[in-house]
Amino acid sequence: IQGVWVHPEFRGAGVGTAGTASVANAVVATGRTASLYVNDYNRVARRAYSRVGFRQIATFATVLLD
C-alpha cells in the first residue's frame, strides 16, 4: 500500500485509518500479505497504521544518486 493521503479538511477524522484498513483487508482477503512503507518521521501516519494493525518488521534507507 502506498500513497495514502487525506485532504487536510478531513484529517483527524479517521478517514485515512478506515481507508487503509479497508484496502489492507481486501488485500489479505485475496491471500496476499498487506504491507506498506512509511517515513520514520511521519508519526501521524505511523500511529494510524498501528491502529489498523500494521507493525514494523524492517527498516530501509533510500539512497538517491544523481
Image (cartoon, rainbow, N blue to C red):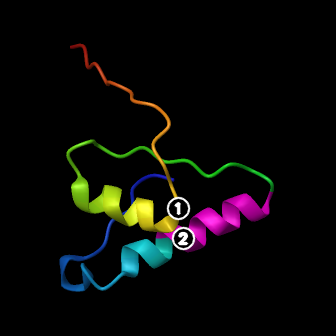
Q: Is residue 23 left or right of residue 20?
A: right
Rendered residue at 77%/64% (across/down): 29
The one nearer the camera, 50 or 16, is: 50
Residue 45: x %, y % from top left: 31, 60
Q: Residues within 10 Å of mark 1 (few under 14, many from 20)?
A: few
Q: Quadrant of residue 23?
A: bottom right
- Point out the stretch of residues depicted in magenta: 20-30
Say which amino acid is labelled 1: Gly
Q: Is residue 51 left or right of residue 22?
A: left
Residue hosting label 2: 21
Say which amino acid is labelled 2: Ala
Rendered residue at 26%/42% (across/down): 40
The one nearer the camera, 58 or 37, is: 58
Residue 7: x %, y % from top left: 25, 76
Q: Quadrant of residue 65?
A: top left
Residue 39: x %, y % from top left: 29, 43
* Eye-nearest disc, 2 or 1: 1
Residue hosting label 1: 53
